């Protein structure tokens, strides 16, 4: 009941704020929101390729008996067609209490947001898929799941800069525990 009341209060407040905006403010707000979803099209300059490579460090939290464990990885990617990106990532984690090491080699497809809204303009959503190699028994399982994150540039440049962000993914895996991973992402953009 409390959640419903809070939701209604926030919705009412938002509608009231929008109603009080001038027509110019409404137009500017609509333009900013529309820029968030870039129009698909071919890449027309080097910076639009968004070529990058990076490091990730975070936590993997598998379902079941294993405790949360540190996860480390590397990733690469680029945007061959605006706003869609492709890439790959290699992550590894040694699950506490099990002496089991999991290594994921994942292909990634993303939709990259744009526009003027801070954080949102540097965000992405997507899907990852690929094999998961396990140290015990030499098993290889298949993983697939959603991913999301953002990369905030540390410099105001179109290329040759570092970004710091967060990334998260949930992996559905055949025959073993599914897992949620989240961590920091440091990337270099060419």
Image (tube, grey):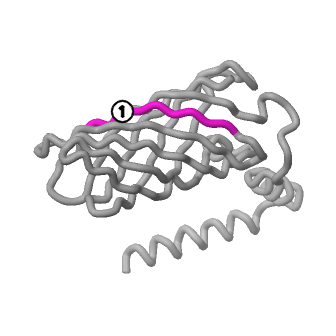
Q: Tell me which segment is drawn in magenta.
A: 70-78
Q: Position of residue 174 (x, y in %)?
A: 33, 62
Task: Please name whichever residue, 68 or 173, is drawn nearer the observer in this view of the structure.
Answer: 173
Please identify the residue farthest to the front as the structure is shown.
138
Q: Which residue is mark 1?
A: 72
Q: What's the residue at 56%, 47% (across, down)?
A: 108
Classify mark 1: residues with Cα within 10 Å, few (<14), some (14-19) or many (20+).
some
Residue 116 spot, x, y in % from top left: 74, 43
Residue 128 x, y percent position in the rendering: 51, 52
Residue for point 48% across, 45% down: 106
Secondary element at image label 1: strand
Residue 76 vs residue 48, the one in the foreground:
76
**16 relative to 169 in the view: left or right:** right
Q: Residue furthest top?
A: 160
Give the main secondary structure of the magenta stretch.
Answer: strand
* Quadrant into which the C terminus falls: top right
Q: Position of residue 2 (x, y in %)?
A: 37, 75
User: Position of 101 compared to 11: left or right?
Assistant: left
- Residue positioned most to the bottom: 1
The residue lying at 69 percent from left, 45 percent from top is 117
Q: Residue at x 73, y 51 (%)?
A: 36
Relative to 142, residue 19 above or below: below
Q: Is residue 10 magenta?
A: no
Rendered view: 59 above or below 40: above
* Image mark count: 1
Query: Which quadrant of the view contains residue 87?
Result: top right
Query: Where is 56 relative to 111, above or below?
Result: above
Front position in the image: 89 or 36: 89
Extreme-left residue of the structure: 97
Which quadrant would the N terminus be assigned to in this image? bottom left
């Amino acid at each position: 009941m409390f959640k419903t009341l809070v939701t209604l209060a926030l919705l009412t407040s938002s509608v009231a704020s929008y109603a009080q905006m001038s027509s110019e403010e409404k137009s500017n707000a609509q333009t900013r929101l529309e820029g968030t979803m870039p129009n698909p099209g071919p890449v027309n300059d080097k910076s639009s390729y968004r070529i990058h490579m990076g490091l990730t460090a975070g936590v993997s939290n598998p379902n079941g008996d294993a405790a949360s464990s540190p996860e480390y990885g590397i990733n690469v990617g680029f945007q061959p067609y605006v706003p869609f990106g492709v890439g790959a990532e290699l992550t590894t984690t040694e699950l506490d209490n099990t002496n089991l090491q999991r290594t994921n080699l994942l292909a990634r497809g993303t939709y990259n947001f744009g526009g003027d809204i801070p954080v949102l303009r540097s965000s992405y959503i997507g899907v990852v898929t690929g094999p998961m190699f396990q140290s015990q028994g030499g098993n290889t399982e298949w993983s697939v799941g959603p991913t999301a994150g953002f990369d905030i540039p540390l410099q105001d440049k179109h290329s040759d800069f570092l970004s710091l962000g967060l990334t998260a993914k949930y992996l559905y895996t055949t025959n073993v525990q599914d897992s949620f991973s989240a961590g920091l992402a440091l990337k270099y953009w060419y």
